[in-house]
Image: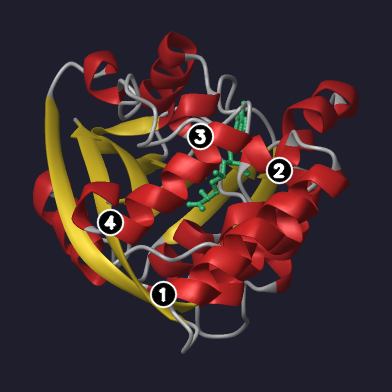
Amino acid sequence: MNIGPMRELGGVFDRVADAYDAGRPSYPDEMYRAVCELTGVELDGAMTVDVGAGTGILTRALRARGSQVIAVDPGAGMLARLLARAGGGGQPPLAAVQGDGNALPVADGVADLVTYGQSWHWLDPAASIAEARRVLRPRGAIVGCWNLHHAAQARWLADYEARLAEEVPAYWGPAVEEWAVPPIAAAFEVIEERWIPWTRLVGIEDFLLDLRSHSYMAALSPEAADALVERQRAELRREFPEGLLSVPMRVYLAVGR
Ligand SMILES: C[S@@+](CC[C@H](N)C(=O)[O-])C[C@H]1O[C@@H](n2cnc3c(N)ncnc32)[C@H](O)[C@@H]1O
């Protein structure tokens, strides 16, 4: 395997892998029910290729529901955490492979599902879908999902996002007027889309770890990132002295067959 380019691809998230692992939320149960309903694939007994698996947030949930998983990611640091948290006996088989979603290191026609948990926007839109089709069995399906802040549902969250938009040059999110979900729907022939609302109860410190795990934060100098987190912490503590946040979230789920 050509490790040089893999290191480059994986580099952004490897720098924030600890924060990613500790701070990012998992997906709500309802999303997995919707995946089964929309794809017609039962997770129990399925074979899933999880592309851009990262530290394994989606991989772990798929295995807990009975799916074997081949987890693919260019980031060695992210995959190391995925393996460390994989758990042991009684679970379906897991393979973790350092690789590129645009050239999957997976044989033709082996998968019931190819999943992209917050990752498809990092890939080439045409090459990645061609690769997903290649590794899928005839009745298999492609699943893209993104766990997003629903900023329009809470003033404090809209203000938090607005502060990020002002202060972080690479910020891309709901406070940017032209922000939109990645155009995965346009890349499929047959597509079903669903928005799944849910609420995340989280302490301020874990919420700030989540902030640190975003690629736009990894692009800042450590000093600038620390200063920004400190300003957000002060604001959130002022608004929520008890230290607990109720964060309106929504998952954007897109399924192609
Ligand atoms: C935002 S994380 C998503 C992690 C996880 N799937 C989740 O649900 O939280 C995006 C992941 O995509 C990976 N990635 C970036 N470029 C990629 C590529 N060309 N092929 C596969 N994965 C890639 C990154 O290394 C990172 O782990």
- The Cα atoms of the two marked residues, 2 and 1, are separated by 24 Å
The quadrant of the rendered image in which ligand 1 is seen is top right
- Residue type beneath disc 3: Ala
Indicate which label's residue lies in the foreground, 2 or 1.
2
Pointers 3 and 1 in contact (CB under 8 A)? no
Q: Which residue is mark 4?
A: 155
Colour convention of the picture: secondary structure
Image quadrant in which the N terminus is located: top right
Upstream in sequence: badge 3 or badge 2? 2
Q: Nearer the viewer, residue 214 or 121?
A: 214
Residue 147 lies, with reference to residue 61, above or below; the image says above
To which quarter of the image does residue 55 belong?
bottom right
Q: Residue furthest bottom?
A: 242
Per the rendering, the mark at residue 13 is 2
Q: Which residue is mark 1?
A: 64
Q: Is residue 201 left or right of residue 39?
A: right
Upstream in sequence: badge 2 or badge 1? 2
Q: Nearer the viewer, residue 24 or 166?
A: 166
Q: Where residue 128 sits: x, y (%)?
A: 47, 20
Q: Is residue 145 left or right of residue 153?
A: right
- The Cα atoms of the two marked residues, 3 and 2, are separated by 20 Å
- The Cα atoms of the two marked residues, 3 and 1, are separated by 37 Å
To which quarter of the image does residue 58 belong?
bottom left
